[in-house]
Amino acid sequence: MALFVNEAPILGDATVVRTPATAVSDAKIQVEEFVAIVNLAAASTANQDVFIAAPGQNYQVTGVTATFGTASTSGTLDVVKCTGTTAVSAGTSIMTGTISLAGTANTPQHGTLSSTVSGLQLAGAANGASSGGDRLGIKLGGTLTSLADCLVQIRLKRI
């Protein structure tokens, strides 16, 4: 079967694209998913609620980016992994440091992810349950005065 121009097949996690006989190996399609938290502002609390849970699927964080319309005075953002009943305030950071929310407005600030792969992986809920599994949350710190229109994007891939 051949695809026609503008056809967009839906590919699953197990999809493998066969390459020509001259190629070294087949290619596995890797899809990244995005989670966006929009409109964080100076009125935000220091510890945010959990914003993603991984029911039934295992994920790995592949990137964290923050962009804001108005910078804070000296605010910071951390993304933490919570396991079991761990609260966001006690979660383990998935980055080597925090992202500054006091930089240049409208300029993406990229977090540096931990080099410990297991720290970036989220275990899904057991047996397809609708609850349980690891979660991610955000912690804001410093002085958030003036922060407005902050967008946080988390990139994930299924593993």
Image (cartoon, helix red, strand yellow):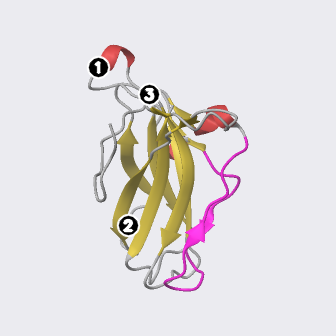
* Magenta stretch: includes residue 101: yes
Q: Which contiguous range is marked in magenta?
A: 94-115
Work out whether mark 3 precedes mark 2 in sequence or the reverse, and give the earlier one: 3
Q: Is residue 141 above or below residue 138?
A: below
Disc number lying in front (3 or 1): 3
- Dot 2 corresponds to which residue? 44
User: From the viewer's perspective, is 38 left or right of 90?
Assistant: left
- Residue 19 place in picture, x, y as percent: 56, 37
Residue 65 can be seen in this image = yes
Please indicate whether residue 74 sits to the left or right of residue 8 in the image: right
User: Closer to the N terminus: mark 3 or mark 1?
Assistant: 3
Determine the image quadrant of residue 74: bottom right
Tell me how far mark 3 sits from mark 1, CA to CA: 22 Å
Above or below — where is 36 with respect to 31?
below
Q: Mark 3 points at which residue?
A: 14
- Mark toward the viewer: 1 or 2: 1
**Label 2 near label 1: C-beta < 8 Å?**
no
| Residue type of the residue flagged with mark 2 | Ser
Q: Is residue 48 magenta?
A: no
Majority secondary structure of the magenta segment? loop
- Sequence-wise, which precedes: disc 1 or disc 2? 2
